[in-house]
Amino acid sequence: MLDNLLIAMRCVAPIIICLFVGGLVRRSGLLSEETNRQMNRLVFTFLFPQHLFITVYKADFATSFSLPLLLFYLEIVTFYLIISIIVLRRQKISPREIGVMSQNAYRSNLNIVSLPLAESLLGPAGLASMGIIAGIMTPVYNFYAVFTLEMHREGGKFNLKEVLIEIIKNPLVIGAAAGYLMHLLPFRLPEVLLSTMSTMGKTGTTLALILLGASFRLGSLVSDRKRIIGGNIMRLIAAPLFAFLLALLIGLDNRDIALLVLAAGAPLATVSYTMCQVYDSDAELAAELIVTTSMLCCLTLFLWIFALKQLGIA
């Protein structure tokens, strides 16, 4: 039991430390809001795509690719999307809130949180498997997000052509697609290039967590506490619990169940904030959910990892 507790702590400790460092950076005044936005853009458009590229490029698809897991996770995400829109539209909330809360129901932070946790818990094979999931699900997430946000803003309508163009232009999609295409080539890229890209990609993951910690504000959380509490329960407890129980019911193998929990139980993706700004959704609520789910996932994912180890699943 003690060993499993230490493993769980080791998995989530880097996230806690990076968020804490981000808070110190903000309090020290070293990082302005404008600089924070610019660095987030750097991470999203340049560093993250390299991380996805390396992860997919180096993945052993013969042993790391699990079609049952991928199909199951896709079905779960689609189910969360549909159910969330149905439920939210019946409540007395604005359309701008629906776009945010729906994203919170299905869109988890695979790249920043799930990837490093999969590596910590399951080793290089876990990282490769989660990298494949992230590479394939990133365009799906973006398609669903554009659909959801476009349909719930004033005068919005769903244009399939525009959505597909936005997905194709997405840096994360480009990084994952390029990694897969290069993986299929009969020759390997120079190791010095791969090493450099790997270093920059890992830097992006660390920097994103620090920037997220630096964006944390307590003031606005009080007035939005009901929406935030409900959103956190959905993202960190209900989403992974439902996926976990259903995976046990259909008989996924232990490794796939562990990966599923790490994917479904991750916090709301940081890119959701940027997309909410672009599509005139409630970006402030999105920011609050991103920060609170990212902070609280240190506890919930710790408990999930500990439970998986105790049950002999991971």
Image: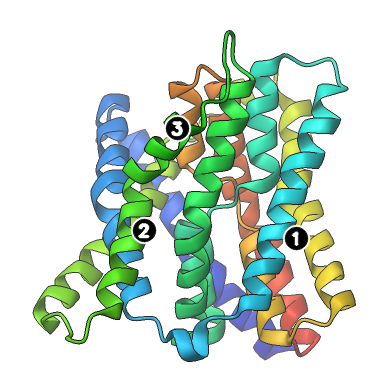
Q: Quadrant of residue 228?
A: top right
Label 2 or label 1, whichever comes before in sequence order? 2
| Quarter placement of the C terminus | bottom right
Query: Which residue was labeled with disc 2?
Result: 205
Q: Position of residue 81 (x, y in %)?
A: 72, 42
Numbered disc 2: secondary structure: helix
Label 3 or label 1, whichever comes before in sequence order? 3
Q: Position of residue 191 (x, y in %)?
A: 13, 83
Q: Residue at x 38, y 53 (%)?
A: 173
Label 1 amino acid? Pro
State left or right for residue 174 relative to residue 294: left
Classed neighbour count for the residue bearing mark 2: other residues with Cα under 10 Å, few (<14), some (14–19), many (≥20): many
- Cα–Cα gap, marks 3 and 1: 33 Å
Query: Which residue was labeled with disc 3?
Result: 161
| Residue 275 seen anywhere in this rendered image of the structure | yes
Label 2 amino acid? Thr
Classed neighbour count for the residue bearing mark 1: other residues with Cα under 10 Å, few (<14), some (14–19), many (≥20): many
> 213 or 93, which lies in front?
93
Which callout, 2 or 3, points to the residue nearer the camera?
Answer: 3
Numbered disc 1: secondary structure: helix
Q: Position of residue 190 (x, y in %)?
A: 10, 81
Name above or below for residue 168 compared with residue 70: above
Which callout, 3 or 1, points to the residue nearer the camera?
Answer: 3
Q: Residue at x 31, y 36 (%)?
A: 28
Mark sitting on residue 240: 1
Name above or below for residue 314 compared with residue 238: below
State left or right for residue 286 relative to residue 176: right
> 142 or 203, which lies in front?
142
